[in-house]
């Protein structure tokens, strides 16, 4: 797990959000021709393989701030629960649909019951892969993170399946609220910290809608 100075640097630069349009196009085509279960399996398989063969580039999770972690879905069979809690996370915010918690070959995702056994608070906000997280759900997610950090004194691990799109959207909103960043600063900060992040223009547009409604900017 890596800690970066990207948050500090983002406030002093005029960043430009980068879009992996080819990667997004390929992902959308695959999702259109595959069942949800098969697409989810493929996404997990790519993440697992990349984390093995390119461990420095494809880190499973990152520290965004001392209280906020951002990453892929934790796997029971990879001992992620012990590793994540060992790093100080004691609350989990999942941005996943129900089928994404189903066990598949070489991957058994951590579910709410697993976290409860470890006294870790858990919230899942359902939102489809590759799609923008609705504004109301972004607001719910940001509010949950704020409560866990400010009132419950818990550090929060935010994840979707790959830690590349939906959870990036939430983490960007958290940075905008907590660190007073612009949308460009927050998203670019996460992209520098987590190179595999693959946020879409539509997801960024929804982040801007959330900011206008809830931050007034």
Image (cartoon, rainbow, N blue to C red):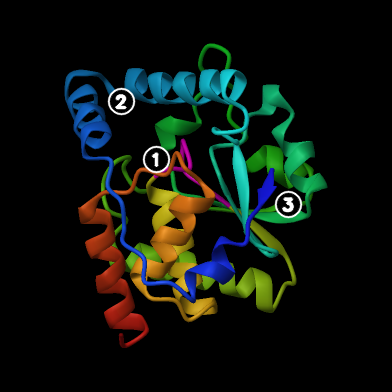
155 displayed left or right of 11: right
- Residue at image coords 27%, 55%: 203
Residues at circles 2 and 3 in contact by the CB criterion of under 8 Å: no
* Quarter containing the C terminus: bottom left
Residue situated in front as seen by the camera: 11 or 94: 11
Quickly name the residue at label 2.
Answer: 36
The answer to whether residue 28 is above or below residue 157 is above
Residue 89 location, quadrant: bottom right
Q: Earlier in the sequence, mark 2 or mark 3?
A: 2
Q: Earlier in the sequence, mark 1 or mark 2?
A: 2
208 displayed left or right of 70: left
Quickly name the residue at label 3.
Answer: 120
Residues at circles 1 and 2 in contact by the CB criterion of under 8 Å: yes
* Quarter containing the N terminus: top right
Residue 97 numbered mark, or none: 1
Number of callouts: 3
At mark 3, the secondary structure is: loop
- Residue at image coords 22%, 33%: 22
* x then y, percent, for residue 212: 27, 81
Does the stretch in magenta take in 139?
A: no
Q: What range is drawn magenta here?
A: 158-164
- Residue at image coords 73%, 52%: 120
Q: Residues within 10 Å of mark 2 (few under 14, many from 20)?
A: some
Q: Earlier in the sequence, mark 1 or mark 3?
A: 1
Residue situated in front as seen by the camera: 114 or 155: 155
């Amino acid at each position: 797990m890596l800690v970066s100075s990207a948050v500090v640097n983002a406030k002093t630069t005029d960043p430009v959000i980068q879009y992996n349009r080819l990667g997004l196009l390929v992902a959308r085509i695959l999702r259109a021709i595959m069942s949800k279960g098969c697409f989810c399996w493929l996404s997990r398989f790519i993440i697992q393989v990349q984390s093995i063969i390119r461990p420095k580039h494809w880190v499973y999770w990152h520290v965004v701030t001392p209280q906020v972690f951002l990453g892929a879905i934790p796997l029971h069979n990879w001992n992620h629960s012990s590793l994540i809690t060992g790093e100080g996370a004691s609350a989990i915010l999942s941005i996943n649909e129900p089928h994404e918690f189903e066990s598949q070959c070489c991957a058994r995702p951590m579910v709410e019951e697993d976290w409860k056994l470890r006294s870790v608070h858990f919230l899942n906000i359902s939102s489809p892969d590759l799609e923008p997280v609705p504004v109301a759900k972004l607001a719910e997610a940001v509010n949950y993170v704020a409560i866990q950090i400010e009132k419950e004194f818990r550090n929060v691990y935010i994840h979707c399946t790959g830690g590349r799109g939906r959870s990036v959207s939430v983490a960007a909103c958290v940075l905008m609220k907590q660190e007073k960043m612009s949308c460009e600063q927050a998203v670019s900060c996460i992209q520098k910290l987590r190179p595999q992040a693959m946020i879409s223009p539509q997801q960024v547009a929804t982040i801007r809608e959330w900011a206008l409604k809830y931050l007034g900017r």
